[in-house]
Image: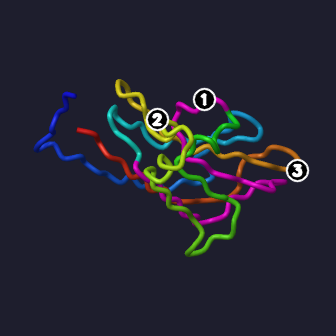
Amino acid sequence: MPYQVLTGQWSKIYTHKFRVKYSDFTYPFANYAECTLLDLPRTVEVIGVKMWLREAFVRTGMTLCTGYVVTDQVASYGLESQFDFAFMQLNATPGDDVGTLVMTAGRVNTAPNPDQYLICNQTAPTQIDVRVKLTYNSGSPPFTAGEFDIWIMTMKLP
């Protein structure tokens, strides 16, 4: 079986940090909010995501607010929990231990379909988004408060 040994071509690891505020979101549907974080160049993979809640998200009538870090390849709303890199409850009480850190390798090892956690498009950039699923009792006004930090760790393949 032929193979290639890559010498002198070390992978480059980068960390992208974002502070996402309630005012950064658009509302494509009544029970969803979205925010684009970055476009990753081709051959770049997400190797981990950390989310930390700084201020709870507030919206009139809201009972649950879950933020997911996904690629734009997740076209169908409602499938976020199957294809997310990380997720966090955004209406929780903030604190030093309110957040999440998920390394992609662990997700790939336990996933029934590993490529759902890999960026398979190697010919074009891939957009990374935050998608928020909302559960509420009445109305659909925008957020009035909320803020969290996201660190996205990426690796460029040689």
Task: Please tell me whether residue 49 is drawn above or below residue 56 in the rendered image.
Answer: above
In this image, 117 relative to 145: left or right? left
Q: Secondary structure at mark 2?
A: strand
Q: Earlier in the sequence, mark 1 or mark 2?
A: 1
| Left or right, residue 122 beside residue 133 | left
In terms of secondary structure, what is the magenta stretch mainly?
strand
Earlier-in-chain disc, 3 versus 2: 2
**Separation (CA) of disc 1 from disc 2:** 12 Å
Task: Examine the structure image and report whether residue 60 is included in the region drawn in magenta.
Answer: yes
Report the residue at 58% width, 33% height from top: 74
**Which residue is label 2 attached to?**
127
| Residue numbers of the magenta segment | 47-76
Q: CA distance from mark 3 to mark 2?
A: 32 Å
Q: Earlier in the sequence, mark 3 or mark 1?
A: 1
Q: Is residue 44 above or below residue 63?
A: above
The residue that disc 3 covers is: 137
Quadrant showing the C terminus: top left
Q: In this orientation, which residue lies closer to the viewer: 42 or 62?
A: 42
Which residue is the site of mark 1? 75
Tags 3 and 2 in contact by the CB under 8 Å rule? no
Q: Residue furthest left?
A: 8
For label 2, count other residues whose C-alpha is less than 10 Å away and answer few (under 14), some (14-19) or many (20+): some
Q: Percent x, y for residue 41?
A: 34, 34
Residue 61 x, y percent position in the rendering: 84, 54
Quarter occupied by the N terminus: top left
The secondary structure type at the circle numbered 3 is loop
Of residue 57 and residue 106, the one placed in the foreground of this image is 106
| Direction from residue 157 to residue 31 in the image, left or right | right
